[in-house]
Image (tube, rainbow, N blue to C red):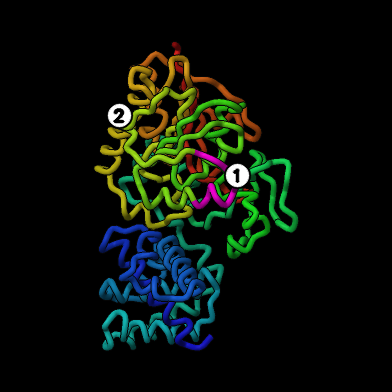
Amino acid sequence: MPQSATLAPRSAALDLITAVFEQRRSLSEARVAPEGRAATLPPDARARAARLAQDALRQMGRADHLLRRALRKSPPENVLWVLRLATVEMLALGAPAHGVINDAVALTRGWAGEPKLTGLVNAVLRQMAQHSAQDWAQTPVPRLPAWLRGALQNAYGTQITQAIEGAHQQPAPLDLTLRDPSSLPEGLDAQLLPTGSLRLHQAGQVSALPGFDAGAWWVQDAAASLPARLLGDMRGLSVLDICAAPGGKSMQLAAGGADVTALDISGPRLVRLRENLARTGLAASVVQGDALHWTPDTPFDAVLLDAPCSATGTIRRHPELPHLRSRADIKALCALQAQLLDRVLDPAQGLLRAGGRVVYCTCSLLPEEGEAQATAAMARHNTRALRVDLPGVADAWRTPEGGIRTRPDYWPDLGGMDGFYMIVLQHMG
């Protein structure tokens, strides 16, 4: 590639990383920010910048392990990120050292604004380029930040926590949910997972895959596809999907024959939900509103509450998350989850009919956002947990209070899965 074709995505990747740490933005938010460098790039270059930023954030601990040996003292943070990005590209992604080092020197002079340190960057990266793939593989698996690692150790023990950290080092594959499980789009080279999802390990451009234009499927992690299935035969049921955008679970419910109301507080996110419904040809009533205050004309037979949470189960996809969250965030999220559970489990609130069912789920690894929330809610309300057998769900995933817990270290030979908690609760009437 000409230098300009590689330099621009690398510069944009560093901008995205800066937005994570300085502006507390997720990579997806920073990528579309109109003032950001990434937004000005062609689609291919923008996607490359996002992948580079993800890889650098995912592998920064390994890069630091090797860089510490080569640096007498730590350089300014912006130069350190140039070194990290270049080290990850050479050793983790296999990029040719010559082009990476040339661009890193240019980025040190331009993006980082440190022309006096170009010699240091050149020398250090030439040293990094001497490391083998085995050297990289033998670097310690990076640890999660202390606030999260401690919570996971308390919940699962050190061995499982280390397995989760190891799973986070691998990018997540692309999983699809079929609109019609009996109809596989021709030409789609995918692996059928035990739970019924399709998995693509080399996906490429999603919109170019067979079946996309026909709306035959949508992107949804295998673990994320399980909560809606807990409702079993949903034909003819009126179902409220709370926090519905971008619509994966709403589409599952609609494809299963439910009369779906998709509720979300975010207007921009509902735009994407409507687009997904239009592409798949599925129908749902879309409502913008706050689930703590919105009330329908008639209570629903079932409610699916995909509650706001720490999203710590999705770190494979979003390696910036541990750097955006804190212990204080979890406390506030847990309070909101409890409020939402109280709202949906009490028929007097008008959302659920007496005897109706609630599926509660979070994409969190923390029991306080899952098992503990469900246990406390059952103690406050006249409800019971229902056991629903789903294909591919192992007994080891089941939890004492009646829920299901998935983790990134599950299915290691298949490519893992997101961390999720889910439970179906029935009002006793």
Range drawn in magenta: 275-284
Instruction: Say what secondary structure mark 2 lies in.
Output: helix
Q: Between 10 and 291, which is closer to the camera in this rendering?
A: 291
In terms of secondary structure, where does tag 1 sit?
Answer: loop
Question: Where, by quadrant of the figure, is residue 81 drawn?
Answer: bottom left
**Residue under the point 47% across and 81% down:** 6
* Amino acid type of the residue tagged 1 in the rendering: Trp
- Work out which residue is located at the far front of the displayed protein and give it: 297
Residue 360, placed above or below residue 133:
above
Q: Residue furthest right?
A: 186
- Which residue is found at the position 29% from the left and 85% from the top? 117
Q: At 34% across and 17% down in the image, what residue appears?
A: 348
Is residue 427 shown in magenta? no
Q: How many marks?
A: 2
User: In the image, which disc is placed on residue 249?
Assistant: none
Viewer-nearest of labels 1 and 2? 2
Left or right of 245? Residue 228 is right
208 up-or-down from 327: above or below: below
**Circle 2 sits on which residue?**
339
The quarter holding residue 343 reads: top left
Q: Position of residue 359 (x, y in %)?
A: 47, 29
Q: For the residue carrying disc 2, how many other residues have a C-alpha within 10 Å: few (<14), some (14-19), or many (20+)?
A: some
Q: Quadrant of the N terminus?
A: bottom right
Q: Are marks 1 and 2 in contact (CB under 8 Å)?
A: no
Relative to 425, 203 lies left or right: right
Quadrant for the C terminus in the image: top left
Q: Which residue is mark 1?
A: 411
Give the residue type that dot 2 points to.
Gln
